[in-house]
Image: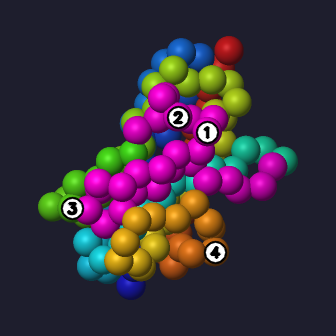
Amino acid sequence: QVQLVESGGGLAQAGGSLRLSCAASGLTFTFYAMGWFRQAPGKEREFVAATSRSGLNKKYHDSVKGRFTISRDNAKNTVYLQMNSLKPEDTADYYCAADYREYLSSSSQGDYDYWGQGTRVTVSS
């Protein structure tokens, strides 16, 4: 079956960095756009970043532009989220997701077919 397994979460100080990874299995990775979403305590899950099948098209939530970078390694069936200049408001559970589409990528949660279990990121001030 399809599995998306996130790793790399943890505790960071404000201004610091973390890199999240999401390893996919049970699907043809290159058929899927990939996205990262997050859910902060008491809030709804929101879009963070997404990348197309090729990795050439990327999109970001305005709140993370210039600080976060999404990338993928199709040979390793893995998508990454490099998070720099972290802020306390980045504290959340981060989820990766896979969207079966041919072109571009989506910021809409409803477009995604598979989801990981999440990894927690805590940023202290």
Of all residues, the one furthest to the right in this rendering is 42
Locate residue 118, reporting x and y percent. 55, 56
As drawn, 70 above or below 96: above
Of all residues, the one furthest to the bottom in this rendering is 1
Q: Which residue is mark 1?
A: 62
Q: Mark 2 and mark 1 in contact (Cβ < 8 Å)?
A: yes
How many residues crowd around disc 3 within 10 Å: few (fewer than 14), some, or many (20 or more)? some
Q: Which residue is mark 4?
A: 110
User: Position of 64 compared to 29: left or right?
Assistant: right
Q: Earlier in the sequence, mark 4 or mark 3?
A: 3
Indicate the amino acid at tag 1. Answer: Asp
How many residues crowd around disc 2 within 10 Å: few (fewer than 14), some, or many (20 or more)? few
Please name the residue shown 53% across and 15% down the image.
15
Indicate the amino acid at tag 3. Answer: Asn
Q: Earlier in the sequence, mark 4 or mark 2?
A: 2
Which quadrant does the N terminus fall into?
bottom left
Q: Which mark is residue 76?
A: none
Q: Secondary structure at mark 3?
A: loop
- The reply to whether residue 4 is visible in this rendering is no
Please name the residue shown 44% across and 70% down the image.
98
Marks 4, 1: nearer the viewer? 1
Q: Which residue is mark 2?
A: 65
Indicate the amino acid at tag 4. Answer: Gly
User: Position of 46 compared to 70: left or right?
Assistant: right
Q: Secondary structure at mark 2?
A: loop
Locate residue 91, reporting x and y percent. 66, 35
User: Position of 112 compared to 53: left or right?
Assistant: right
How many residues crowd around disc 4 within 10 Å: few (fewer than 14), some, or many (20 or more)? few
As drawn, 96 above or below 98: above
